[in-house]
Amino acid sequence: MTGEFTSIGKRVPRSDGRQKATGAFRYMTDIPREDRLYGALVHPRCSHALVDGIDVSGALACPGVVRVVTAKDVPGLNRHGLIWKDQPVFCDRVVRYSGDTLADVIAVTPEIALRAAALVRVSLSPLPEVLTPEEALAQGAPAIHDGGNLAAEYSFAKGDVADAFSRSDVIVEETFLTPYQEHAYLETEGGAARPLPGGGVEIWEGCQNGIRAARDLALILNVPEERVIVHSHPLGGGFGGKDDLTLQGILAVCAHACGKPVQIDFSREESFLVSPKRMPMKIRMKMGATWEGKLLAISVHLLGTCGAYACYGPAIMSLALEHACGFYLFPHVEVAGELGYTNNSLVSAFRGFGNVQVNFAVESMMDMVAEKLGMDPVAFRRMNALRPGVRTSYGYLTSPSVYADGVLGKLEETELWRDRESFRQSAPKPWLKRGVGMAACFQGVGLGNHCFPDSARARVDLREDGTFLIAFSNEDMGQGNVTTLQMMAAESLKVPLSRIEAVCGISGQVPESGATTASKTTYLTGKAVLGATEKLLAAAGKALGCGRDDLVLDDGGANGRPWSEIYALLPPGERSWEGSSEFQYVEERYDFGVHYVYAYLSQVAGVEVNTLTGEVRVLKTEMIPASGRVINPLGFEGQCEGGAVMGMGYALHEDFSVPGNPRGITRNFQTYLIPTMADMPDIAVTAMEESEVTGPFGASGIGESVAVTGSAAIMNGVFDAVGIRIRELPCSRETLLREINGNNKKTER
Amino acid sequence: MLHIRFNLNGKDVDADIHEGTRAIDLLRDTFELTGTKESCGQGECGSCTILLDDEAIHSCLLLAAQMEGCRVVTIEGLEKEGELDALQQAFLDAGAIQCGYCTPGMIMAAKGLLLHNPAPTAEEIRDAMAGNLCRCTGYKKIGEAVSLAADRQRN
């Protein structure tokens, strides 16, 4: 099939790669520092308190300090938030977590600002801290917000679950715990803002939705939207963590208050303290099946930690419930989730949001049920997997491009799965035990039909020299969407990739294509780009005196005329075209959102457990993604490999401790361990390139599914190796060693 | 205040610095060589790696004063007359770059390795690069890029 394409399917180095490799690439935190002031933030030393007063006189007395900005300086709405505007830019009455900002000390150098920030005296009256959702939702708990501590609750039920469990031959019931996970993008939050003559600001800070940020900032500054210009591209990593405002509100207020450009750069410690993370979850799950291996019923209860403000919390709970049955078919279902406000870190989008947590539970449970039935875990999954044209457990029909059984079938053919017995036997020392585990997932593409409209616009301009400019808002945080969209435009116009320039991430100058999140840019903005190029081709056909269908495209033009000539033939108003696209939604409505388009993926992991130290190493992993046609294999593989290692970090090492956690507070990479090259397994990726029939060139989205299955695949491998079932992530050496020693004692007795 | 002289990317330079000025700040703020990145500020992530007399070193843990009399190479010093260093080209070709924030440090760490060991094994690459964090790539293509550059330099 790829033979018919000129750009798509080629291994294309990313278009910004040369600049990135030479150090010439400028991130928002690299803007030359001339004529600007520097800010240092004051955070509270507790996580729940009333603000009685802020004494800034000591800081103001420092030579070099220009101003201390507080809530009083916010000209408009001192609130922002992705779903509800409940998070203050500057804390006014109440401190709700230790990452809140009370004041920003502005000085002529960053060093002076930092020293003076320590001299700001804040009077706080402590309030009782609420650190877990159990405490938050208990009767009589101290209220973190006026409306109480319940941030969201959703549920769905179908059939007669109690009766189905009574008819089940095998029942498994378990509780799973998942931790906070820090995005740990290497570029910390930072940037600058300058006041615009006549009001408003221009701001430079990497962000996954610059246009929405501009809208929020206009409310905060109380100026019309066009008085705020946001430069949000590029980012040194995002993974969901830079979706909401991070520093932009503070930068905007400070630039406005000082009448001069202001810069703030977060240290790693401050980034860890302030930034949102992956939602911790307590998952209770019960499954029932017949001896024949047919799933009969599932019951799921999710309890999520929301942190101090809503941020993306309710959307994550919604996504978690949507994916809580995996891609398996249960005739009888009851699922429910509650989300409690707490006085600790916020939760936001994070690669696979919601699905990552529940997939650990579902895919562990599927192995446990299969084991009780004495069935092969893949055969058991295939027997119960969603199929094209069949309604999901919740009763809706998805796009017919369903590859649940497909990715499971391909997994059975992998070398690691086929030869798992020889892998088990290959451990070089008697205290090293090896095992093989697998897991599979589907992942909704886009935001679903829960709380946000999800559409995209893009523009294509034909330029005088016969080259093209494509414009859209989606920022590139590293995932490579700019190159992917350039390739799609090049393909549709049948011109070399070098003829397509791209611009993105400047509010007011590019069409709005929505948040850069939820595996959706290739799919949704890709369709918008193709919509725009189609309109341009139709206009070119008209100008050349033929219809679109009679247009013969070649390397540099159409019908033998180069694009520079076609430019001259086109009326000025017909050289630039905009395309748009929207997601298709299912007809049914639920408490929580669902999707029409899903990506599918399976993963097998070969692990080694050191029974003397409790250390788990992933030696090999193989991933089978089914995300439709692969546009750029080089970028696609990069997503898969990066996701596999990120999923491994979540499973084995990454544990973000927050205030109230007995293990203390995580401050930097000494205590927050993300995988290094020394931890890297042997990774293989085999894409199942079956078309997503609704997608551009048959593509869907790859960004998230790659990070979903790692924890269950690895923990199923640990069970295969040592017979120990891990129900709490990460699987620390201490926990595993305790379990191994406990088991040994039982055997000795 | 101190006055220091050193060789930066092939040119003799000098600067007035405070005793406590870090090398990374002098490079980024005074010389505007922003290819050198700060991500942890504590020598944990390797984003700020430069070469100091052919040794890969964290510029966030180095005082600017320690560069006195030394040959300093940053990521900006690798490209020669428009031609990329073998490592830069290999990172591009192998798809080893995503967000790119770790890339300069990765390339400088690899440069330090190849200067001392022009034919490293996969194991040696892992050991030498394990101090450089990347959150995007999963490291596979980075390891491949270093091998590719070493192969191309030898052949």
Image: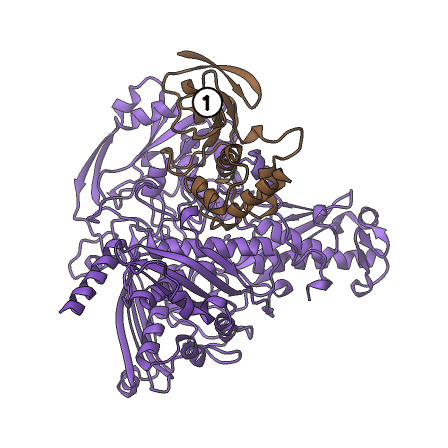
Q: Residue furthest left?
A: A749
Residue placed most toward the observer, A179 or A40: A179
How many numbered discs, if any? 1
Q: Is residue A231 left or right of residue A462?
A: left
Question: Neighbour class for label 1 at 10 Å: few (<14), some, many (≥20)?
Answer: many
Element type at mark 1: helix
Q: Is residue A245 above or below residue A701?
A: above
Q: Residue at x 54, y 40 (%)?
A: B119
Q: According to the image, label 1 marks what residue?
A: B26
> From where the camera sits, is residue B79 visible?
yes
Q: Quadrant of residue A77?
A: top left
Chain A, chosen colour in render: purple
> From where the camera sits, is residue A505 visible?
no
Q: Quadrant of residue A304?
A: bottom left
Residue placed most toward the observer, B79 or A742: A742
The percent position of residue A264, horizontal first and vertical second, equals 41, 32
The quarter in which the N terminus of chain A is drawn is bottom right
Q: Is residue A342 above or below residue A745?
A: above
Tag 1: amino acid: Leu
Q: How is the image coloured?
A: by chain
The percent position of residue B85, horizontal first and vertical second, equals 61, 35
Q: Is residue A594 left or right of residue A92?
A: right
Q: Residue at x 44, y 59 (%)?
A: A620
The quarter in which the C terminus of chain A is drawn is bottom left
Q: Residue at x 41, y 47 (%)?
A: A678
Task: Identify the chain of the residue marked 1, using the numbered disc in the image.
Answer: B
Q: Quadrant of residue A614?
A: bottom left
Chain B, chosen colour in render: brown
Residue placed most toward the observer, A7 or A450: A7
The percent position of residue B3, horizontal first and vertical second, equals 44, 11
